Structures are given as C-alpha cells and as structure tokens.
Amino acid sequence: MKNVLITGGAGFIGSHLCDRFIAEGWQVSCIDNLSTGSADNVNHLIGHPAFRLIKYDVTNYLHTEGELDLILHFASPASPIDYLEMPIQTLKVGSLGTHKALGLAKEKRARFLLASTSEVYGDPLIHPQKEDYWGNVNPVGIRGVYDEAKRFAEAMTMAYHRYHDLDTRIVRIFNIYGSRMRLYDGRALPTFIRQALKGEDLTVYGDGSQTRSFTYIDDLVEGVYRLALSDEVEPVNLGNPDEVSILDFAKEILALTGSTSRIAFRDLPQDDPKVRKPDISRAKSVLDWEPQVPRSEGLRRTVAYFEKAMSG
Ligand code: UDP
C-alpha cells in the first residue's frame, strides 16, 4: 500500500484525485481548510478504510503521522473571484503553503507534485504556450496574487529539487471543468451553464474574442496520475489544445442546453489573458498523454451534473 497526501483534496480537482488514488489502491490523506473546497466533495469517501479527511490550513506548520510516498499540493483558491476575494490567502497558500508541503516531503522523503497553472504564462505573447515560455505577468495587477504565488511555488519547488535533491514534479493546468465545480465560483463555464439553465443573460466579458482551452476533469486526472508516476522533473502542460473564443463557447452552451437566454456583454476584467492554448508535445512524449474527451461530450456530462445540482 502506498501513501499519498493531497492538499486541497476536498476541492474540485483534489477530490477527483482522491477518488483516483483510492481506486488505484493508495492510502489517501486529504488535507483541506474547506475555504473554497467542501467536505461534500469527499463525503462518499468518508468511512473508507484507505481515506481520511483532515481539516487544516497548510500555510501553518505541517506534520502528519506515518509514512508518505507522495504529496500532491493542490491547495489554493483557483477562480478569479476567489482570489480577488482572498488575495492574501492566495499568496500565502502558494508561498507559505508550498514551503510547508515541500518541508514535509523532505522530512518524509516523499515525492512532491505541485499543481501549477497556465496563469504562469500571464497574458501570453507566445501562442500556443510551450513550457519554455517565461510568461507575461503583471505582478501588481489584480490577478498577480495568483499568478505570482504559483510562479514562486514553481521556483521554490525547483530550489528544493536542486538544493535538497527532492524528487519533484510540476503540472501546469489549463482551464479544467467537470462535476464538483461550484455553481457560483465565477468562472465562465459554471456561470454560463447556470445562466443558460435559469434563462438569464449569459454575461460575456469584453467582446468575447479572448480564447481559452477547456479540459475535462477525467483527462486532467489521468495526466496528473501519469506525471506523478513518471520521471519528468520539468514542468508539464496538461490541457486540451482545442481552443475556443469565449463568445463561441457561450453560444455552444446555449445550443447544448436549448436555452432561450441571450448574450449580454460586460466589461473585461483587468489583465484578462487574450489567448490561451497549451502546447502539449511534452505531455505526449513523456507521459504518452493526450485528452480523450472532446468538449461536446465533456460539456454534455457537465450540464447534466449542473442540472441535477440545481434541482437538488
Ligand atoms: N468570463 C466571461 N463571463 C463570465 C466569467 C468569465 O466572459 O461570467 C470570461 C473571462 O473574462 C475570461 C474567460 O471567460 O476571459 C475565462 O474566465 P474564467 O474565469 O473561467 O477563467 P480564467 O481562464 O480567466 O482564469
């Protein structure tokens, strides 16, 4: 039996990782302060002999009993409205929280995997984004609290790798969606689906020409699992390169839900990236990974999830 600690394990992505590692026969410790995560996401695992939930803030001194083979550091607010509402906590979990989790990995001689983000590329001047692009981030802008915390976390992870010989992995995650996203997390996808299902206007920011590349949760989990078991120390992009403009995306959701909602344009937030699309050649070559779930299918499943969540 192998032991994994998942910080942010009660969050959207973290809880799906708990499911996967349990299914693979690991002993899973899930740590979460439940600020943006929810115990509901792991409720079905409570009572499972291989699972435990620890309510704790990883920006504090971190210690667990027993052996650990792997730490997945996924704790962080991750939607723009969350990190705008919790700017200091976002900076703290990316910096202090990453330091504490790395310290625990060193103590336990465990492998450490950092959840980083496409936001390290900021408003990118290179398209699509490859891992060797250094990014275009405004350190003093409103999004800087997330982007810079994750950039610091990557630097800290590599410092532990180089100076303490820690076994580390870094994944850069691109716009994930699927079940257990919060209906009101403010991101485009749950917002549009909610608005479409309620017959409200879909709020497209700016003229909607900005692009994103949406990735279904199951594809991400598969990629993270492969990366965790691989030898790749360099950062790896995980995302679906099927890029779409936000306006077209809103129209897709209208068509899929059969909604009569209209599209209403709103001001574009400060520093909103104009384009985003992963180059996944590294993930293809080192992990033999590429997304399997097309957006049409992933959206169909996700709309069904939100329909149920909204009726319950
Ligand atoms: N967006 C939008 N309407 C919304 C929420 C977001 O048009 O109600 C836009 C947002 O400005 C951005 C894109 O959709 O250009 C994706 O935003 P999201 O918050 O989902 O994630 P981001 O990739 O910006 O972190």
Image (cartoon, helix red, strand yellow):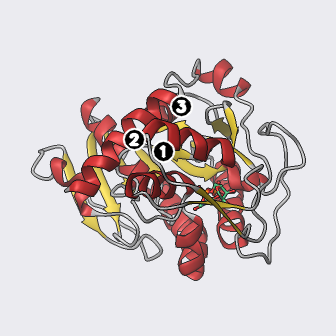
Which dot marks residue 177? Answer: 1
Query: For mark 2, does the 10 Å Cα neighbourhood hold few (<14), some (14 to 19), or many (20 or more) residues?
Result: many
Q: Indicate the quadrant of ligand 1 in the picture.
A: bottom right
- Closer to the N terminus: mark 2 or mark 1? 1
- Seen in the picture, residue 165 relative to 290 is either above or below; the reply is below
Tell whether 197 sits left or right of 47: right
- Closer to the N terminus: mark 3 or mark 2? 3
Asked if labels 3 and 1 touch by Cβ distance under 8 angstroms, the answer is: no
Residue at numbered disc 3: 295
- The secondary structure type at the circle numbered 1 is strand
Asked if labels 1 and 2 touch by Cβ distance under 8 angstroms, the answer is: yes
Asked if the beta carbon under badge 1 is closer than 8 A to the nearest atom of ligand 1, the reply is no
Image quadrant containing the C terminus: bottom left
Q: Residue at x 82, y 69 (%)?
A: 138
Residue found at the far front of this picture: 260
Q: Residue at x 74, y 45 (%)?
A: 276
- The secondary structure type at the circle numbered 3 is helix
Asked if the beta carbon under badge 2 is closer than 8 A to the nearest atom of ligand 1, the reply is no
Q: Residue at x 48, y 61 (%)?
A: 101
Q: Quadrant of residue 207?
A: bottom right
User: x, y (%) of residue 299?
Assistant: 46, 36
User: x, y (%) of residue 283?
Assistant: 64, 27
Residue at numbered disc 2: 302
Which dot marks residue 141? Answer: none
